[in-house]
Image: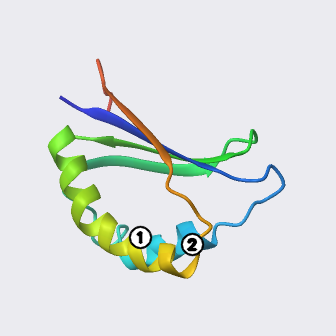
Amino acid sequence: MAVMVIQEFAVEETDCSTNNYDAVGARLNAKQDPPDGLIVHTAGFTGRGSFRIAEVWESVGDWEAFRDGRLADAVQPVMEADPEAGPPDVYSYELHDVIRT
């Protein structure tokens, strides 16, 4: 069953910096080497004091394998360089339906 995973990072409403996101993205190289099970990835500012990453995965297992492997490895040096950047709020839920075009 497909799953939606939401990660939200608290930011100042006037902060539009994507430095940490871009640094993790460069380390992941997901555009050229997509993680197994990833259906779609989106990211952007909510305009309400958070930066949101929303992803759809084929299964919880695919998300957890990515989170505990590639993502953890990519995030660690970025977090060490910016210790004030806290972890995101993360929540997920099974999807009733997914339409692929």
Q: Residue at x 54, y 51 (%)?
A: 43
Q: Secondary structure at mark 2?
A: loop
Residue extending furthest toward the top: 96
The amino acid type, in three-letter code, at marker 1 is Val
Q: Quadrant of residue 26?
A: bottom left
Name above or below for residue 41 compared with residue 18: above
**Residue 38 x/y as whole percent:** 27, 50
Residue for badge 2: 83
Percent position (x, y) of residue 54?
A: 46, 43
**In the rendered structure, which disc, 2 or 1, sits on the residue that comes first in sequence?**
1
Residue found at x 18% / y 48%: 62
Mark 1 is surrounded, within 10 Å at the Cα level, by few (under 14), some (14 to 19) or many (20 or more) other residues, namely some
- 46 displayed left or right of 3: right
> How far across and how far down the image is residue 87, in percent?
49, 55
Residue under label 1: 75
C-alpha distance separating marks 2 and 1: 11 Å
Q: Secondary structure at mark 1?
A: helix
Question: Splitting the image into 4 quarters, where does residue 96 fall?
Answer: top left
Quadrant (top left/top right/bottom left/bottom right) for the N terminus:
top left
Specify whether residue 101 is in view: no
